[in-house]
Amino acid sequence: MKKITKEKLALFWELLARRATLYLPLQEDGVVNFAPWKNGARVNLRENSLVPPKNVFFPQAETYLRFQTGAKKLQLESLEPEEEFILFGVRPCDVASFTILDKVFLEEPVDGLYAKRRRLGTLVSLGCNEPGETCFCTSFELEPAFAPGADVMVWDMGEFLLWEAQSEKGDELTAKINELLDEAAPEESASALSLRNTTAAGEAAAGCQQEWNTAGLQEVLRGKFNVELWEKLYHRCLGCGICTYLCPTCHCFDIQDFSRGLEGERFRCWDSCMFAEFTLMASGENPRPTQKERVRQRFLHKLLYFPSKYGLYACVGCGRCVRKCPVHLDITQVMEPIK
Amino acid sequence: MPASAEKIQLVNPLVPEKGKIIKVLRETPDVKTFHVTTAKGKPFVPMPGQLAMLSLFNIGEAMFSVTSQGERHLEFSIKKTGLLTDALHEADEGQTIGIRGPYGNGFPLEMLKGKDLLFIAGGIGLAPVRSLINFCLDRSGDYGRMQVIYGARTPADLCFKEDLFQNWPSQGLEVNVTVDQGDENWSGPVGFVPSYLEELNPEPEGKIVVVCGPPLMIKFTIQSLDKLKFEHKAVVTTLEKRMKCGIGKCGRCNLGSTYVCLDGPVFTLAQLDQMPVEL
């Protein structure tokens, strides 16, 4: 295991940013979000980002086609991501969300845009020392301080960061920045393991404070399509869609054209099952006509439909939807009566 | 940072092929049939009931069933009903268009083999069924007796009149046509498809039913089929949903964990009975 002392971090970001675009959790106007690092940026390794880092692999809006059009002629130019990048500081829950997005985007027919970004990016995860008050990743058998899907795992040990490569890409990155890394002493390496254990065990200071028992939930929800819960639950939903926009596993998108005269572009952008137009057809028919069907779709998609199709829940317990829902439709609470 | 990054080949399945409308035929006051081809000829070879995503650049994309195909082109019969279809109806021959596909499973051809076939359609719902009717007529030895029950709002709204009144009957297909409301020249049956179906009273034995039409028509037709004792595993329908990607990723055409664009649009009623019903 390697380590880097915190005094060297500024130099470290600079060196990493020279290799590739470096996305870090940056604090601006009191909000932490992943953005490309620039000299003088304020890096915040204490809090997780407001918007999940899925937008680095699956941008909120992404132009993939330019066109020039006329009645009789048409020119198309297909666009694709080219930029190599390092995504540093992703929490283990969000790393797990990429495994979920991979199921959707990497199954045949493969989503080329997402697949290429996954290959262009090197993923460095930062273990959680103190999970936030709405976190419940342990409900999905995730470890707050360990992400098996990351290329490099990093732990914040106070004076220094511990650094461990976990993949070939991780080894490549380690070799490139080796000059700033020191060998960690055996007792320092051991402290990472003990951090993993304390956070995973859910001890007061470090563990997830919310524990949601999800055992057998998928089976419970089977056949619960028409239960009374759905009649009650949706009334306070405003349909604002914040739960889906801030969800690291939500993958729904829209495709739209934007044009000026004869030139234009086609882009895809995040969309939300919370919106009435999401399923509205040109004929005026809507298979999900009220917020009841939309709320039901969101919960059942994450907890029943997705696991039935792909074998894992489409929730990683990051807690963003719990924290930001204006009417407190807390996924860990509202599903309880159904059991 | 893979050293081979520059070698990564991207295949973006959302990028359409360049195509061209080479012929436009008016079927009814609000339905036109478009013949679409590409520089390489036929864009792809769809099976009956499969779909294609068509786009006009500046306006957007929508999913349509392929109603027929020629040696070098595909045919789409499209009702004027929204932004894109309004614009398509304004388009002339020579108009450039985007096309990608084929999408979906198409009709279960193996299941239909050796059976009597009853095709029931309403309005523009005949468009996808027509691809199957023509496929079966071309291989009539593989199927038993074939019958069509079709209805539209008025005689003017009947799609594919040449097929209904000339081509199909001359190929031995029994064609029964009804309209919701007749006019001075209409001497045929008047009434909705479900009641006409009950009046014709087809025998369920050895028969597969293929039904497509507006949601209400499908709903009441299924009730009538139930009355006539058709089993749900012998009734096939093709669904319509709003779709954006066509490849099971954009997340809006699902019925539970089933994606209509990938696993459908064709299902038996027995399959739909097992799914959360959001139709």
Image (cartoon, coloured by chain):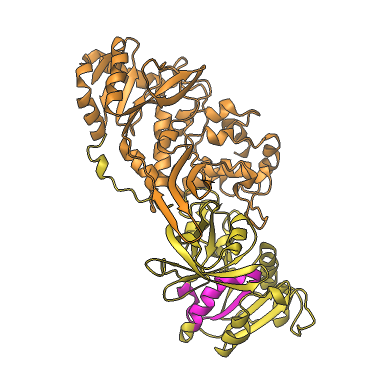
As for residue B126 lying within the magenta part, the answer is yes
Q: Quadrant of residue B26?
A: bottom right
Q: Find out whether residue A220 is within the magenta segment.
A: no
Residue B189 in the image: above or below residue B76: below
Check the rendered structure and report the hue given to chain A. orange
Chain B visual colour: yellow
* Quarter of the image with the C terminus of chain B in it: bottom right
Residue A139 at x, y percent in the picture: 48, 31
Residue A97, located in which quarter of the rendered image? top left
Residue B273 image position (x, y, % from top left): 59, 60
- Residue B96 position within the rendered picture, expressed as x and y whole percent measured from the top left: 48, 61
Tell whether B255 sits left or right of B4.
right
Side of A197 relative to B102 (left or right) = left
Left or right of A18 in this view: B30: right
> Is residue B16 visible in the rendered structure shown here?
no
Q: Which residue sits at x=28%, y=12%? A: A8
Is residue B66 in view? yes
* Residue drawn at point x = 57 percent, y = 25 percent: A323
Given residues A110 and B29, the one toward you in this image is B29
- Residue at 57% across, 85% down: B168
What residue appears at the point 42 percent right and 40 percent down from the top-left corner? Answer: A100
Judged left or right of residue A244, residue A164 is: left
- Magenta span of residues: B109-137
Q: Main secondary structure of the magenta part?
A: helix
